[in-house]
C-alpha cells in the first residue's frame, strides 16, 4: 500500500533569554510565571489530564479480527516527537480495493495516561469522520464504520498534545465473497487469494526473494550472465524493483521452481493439469484469456476488450526476460508451470525447456506451451 507524507507541521516554542555575567541565563518566560501566576503558559494543560488509568489502557493486540477480516491499511503510528501538533495526509491508494468491503477505522489514543493526545481530527477525502469527542473518557480505542472509501482515498490526520503522545490507527476490511483472505510469503509480502472452482489461487504474481525455508534466491541483473545460468535466479523487469515489483512481481527462471520451496508453505507452482483445470472451469483455453485478465487498459495496453476478470484472478501483463533482454510488459503475461517439456511443440530442446501459460493483450484465448528454462517468467502459486 502506498503512503506519502504530504506535510508535517511542528509548533515552535520561543524562549527569550538574557545573559548575566556571561554565564547566568534567565528565561523571561520563567520570570513571567513567577510574577504573574495567571500567565497561560504557567497553568496546567488540561490535555495532559489522566482521565484513563494505566489498567484500562487497551492494546490493538487485544482486538480480535475474526473471519475473513484483515488489514486494508496496516497499523501506523502518528507521534508528537519534539512537537505539540502534527498534520499528515496519507494516500490510501490500493490496487486491491475491489477485493474488500465493510471498512472499519480503528484508532488508539496512546499507550498510557501520559501518551494520550488532547485533540484528534481525522478526515476521509476532506470529510470529518472521527474526532476527540468520539472517545469515551474510559476507553482509548475507537472503531468507526467508514462509508465512501475508494481505491484512491486520502486520510487526513491532525493531532495536538504533549510531546511523546501519539495515536495509532489501521483500517480493517472484509474480503468479499470468493476471496479467501491474505497470504504472506517469507519476505513479508502480502497476497490476496481467490477461489475458482475447487482451486485456491494467488490473485497476484509472486514477489518473494527467498525460498520458504529462508534461503535467498540469487538476484541476477547482468544480461550476459542470465542466459548462461543453470541454477535458480530471479530479477525485476528492466532491473527496476521500485517500478515493477508492487504491480507485476518478480521474474524467475525455471530452475527456481525445482526446489519446491519457491511458494509460501502450503502452496506450490501449478503444473499443466492444474492450469488446465483453471482454464476449463472458466470455459476453456479459447476464452480463458478474456475470463482471467484484468479489465481495462491501465496495465494491459491497446485493445484488451475481451477481458472480464469475472473470477478475480486478475492476470497482469508482466512481460518476461528473454535471454539477454526484457520484453512485452503491458502486452504479454507468462506464468511458469512446474511440468516438464511436452513433445510436439517448440522449442526443440526438451532437456532445456519447461511449460508455461501465456495470455496476450489482443486475444481472448490462453496458451499452454513450451519455453526455454533460461527465460524469466512470472509465477502464480496454487494452494496444496
Image: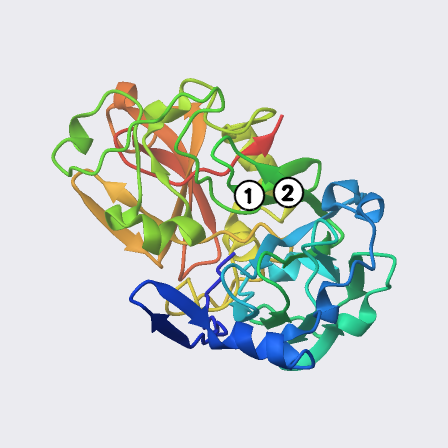
Farthest residue toward the left?
224
The answer to whether residue 316 is left or right of residue 328 is: right
Mark 1 Cα within 10 Å, few/some/many (few <14, many 20+)?
some
- The image quadrant that residue 228 belongs to is top left
Assign the C terminus to one quadrant of the image. top right
Q: Relative to 185, say whether 66 is above or below.
A: below
Residue 355: give x, y in percent of width and height: 39, 31
Instruction: Say if 112 sits above or below 152 in the image.
Output: above
Near-viewer residue (243 or 330) = 243
Question: On the rendered structure, is 199 left or right of 144?
Answer: left
**Residue 218, horizontal then vertical, whole percent:** 29, 27
Tell me which label, 1 or 2, sits earlier in the chain: 2
Q: Which mark is residue 182?
A: 2
Relative to 102, 335 lies left or right: left
Q: Residue at x 51, y 37 (%)?
A: 188
Q: CA distance from mark 1 to mark 2?
A: 6 Å
Q: In which quarter of the view is residue 162 placed?
A: bottom right
Please tell me which residue lies in front, 264 or 229. 264
- Residue at 33% x, 32% y: name it: 345
The residue singled out by tag 1 in the image is 190
Query: In terms of depth relative to the viewer, which is nearer, 91 or 205?
Result: 91
Measured as percent of width and height from the top left, residue 224 is found at 11, 35
Could one spot residue 125 in this view of the protein?
Answer: no
Task: Give the tally of numbered discs.
Answer: 2
In terms of secondary structure, where does tag 2 sit? strand
Residue 80 tag number: none
User: Coloured how?
Assistant: rainbow
* Residue at 45% in and 31% down: 337
**Front position in the image: 280 or 97:** 97
Q: Callout 2: few (<14), some (14-19), or many (20+) C-alpha neighbours within 10 Å?
A: some
- Asked if the residues shown at circle 1 and circle 2 are in contact, with their CB atoms under 8 angstroms apart, the answer is yes
Amino acid at each position: 500500500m502506498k503512503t506519502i507524507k504530504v506535510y508535517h507541521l511542528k509548533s515552535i516554542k520561543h524562549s527569550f533569554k538574557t545573559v548575566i555575567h556571561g554565564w547566568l541565563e534567565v528565561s523571561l518566560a520563567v520570570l513571567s510565571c513567577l510574577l504573574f501566576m495567571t500567565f497561560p503558559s504557567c497553568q496546567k494543560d488540561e490535555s495532559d489530564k489522566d482521565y484513563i488509568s494505566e489498567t484500562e489502557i487497551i492494546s490493538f493486540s487485544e482486538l480480535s479480527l475474526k473471519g475473513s477480516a484483515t488489514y486494508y491499511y496496516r497499523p501506523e503510528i502518528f507521534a508528537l516527537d519534539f512537537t505539540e501538533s502534527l498534520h499528515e495526509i496519507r494516500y490510501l491508494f490500493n490496487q486491491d480495493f475491489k477485493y474488500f468491503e465493510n471498512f472499519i477505522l480503528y484508532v488508539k489514543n496512546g499507550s498510557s495516561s501520559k501518551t494520550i493526545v488532547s485533540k484528534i481530527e481525522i478526515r476521509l477525502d476532506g470529510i470529518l469522520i472521527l474526532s476527540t469527542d468520539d472517545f469515551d473518557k474510559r476507553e482509548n480505542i475507537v472503531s468507526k464504520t467508514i462509508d465512501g472509501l475508494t481505491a484512491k482515498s486520502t486520510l487526513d490526520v491532525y493531532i495536538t498534545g504533549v510531546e511523546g503522545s501519539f495515536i495509532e490507527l489501521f483500517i480493517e476490511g472484509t474480503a468479499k465473497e470468493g476471496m479467501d483472505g491474505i497470504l504472506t510469503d517469507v519476505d513479508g509480502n502480502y497476497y490476496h487469494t481467490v477461489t475458482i472452482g475447487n482451486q485456491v489461487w494467488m490473485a497476484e504474481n509472486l514477489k518473494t526473494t527467498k525460498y520458504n525455508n529462508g534461503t535467498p534466491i540469487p538476484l541476477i541483473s547482468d544480461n550476459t550472465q542470465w542466459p548462461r545460468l543453470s541454477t535458480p535466479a530471479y530479477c525485476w523487469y528492466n532491473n527496476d524493483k521500485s517500478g515493477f515489483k508492487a504491480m507485476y512481481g518478480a521474474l524467475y527462471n525455471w530452475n527456481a521452481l525445482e526446489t519446491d520451496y519457491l511458494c509460501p508453505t502450503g502452496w506450490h507452482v501449478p503444473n499443466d493439469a492444474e492450469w488446465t483445470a483453471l482454464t476449463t472451469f472458466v470455459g476453456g483455453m479459447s476464452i480463458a484469456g478474456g475470463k482471467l485478465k484484468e479489465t481495462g487498459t491501465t496495465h494491459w495496453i491497446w485493445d484488451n476488450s475481451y477481458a472480464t476478470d469475472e473470477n478475480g484472478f486478475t492476470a497482469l501483463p508482466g512481460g518476461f526476460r528473454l535471454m539477454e533482454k526484457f520484453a512485452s510488459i503491458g502486452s504479454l503475461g507468462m506464468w511458469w508451470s512446474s511440468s516438464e517439456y511436452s513433445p510436439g511443440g517448440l522449442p526443440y530442446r526438451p532437456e532445456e525447456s519447461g511449460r508455461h501459460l501465456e495470455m496476450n493483450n489482443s486475444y481472448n484465448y490462453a496458451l499452454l506451451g513450451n519455453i526455454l528454462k533460461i527465460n524469466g517468467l512470472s509465477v502464480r502459486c496454487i494452494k496444496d
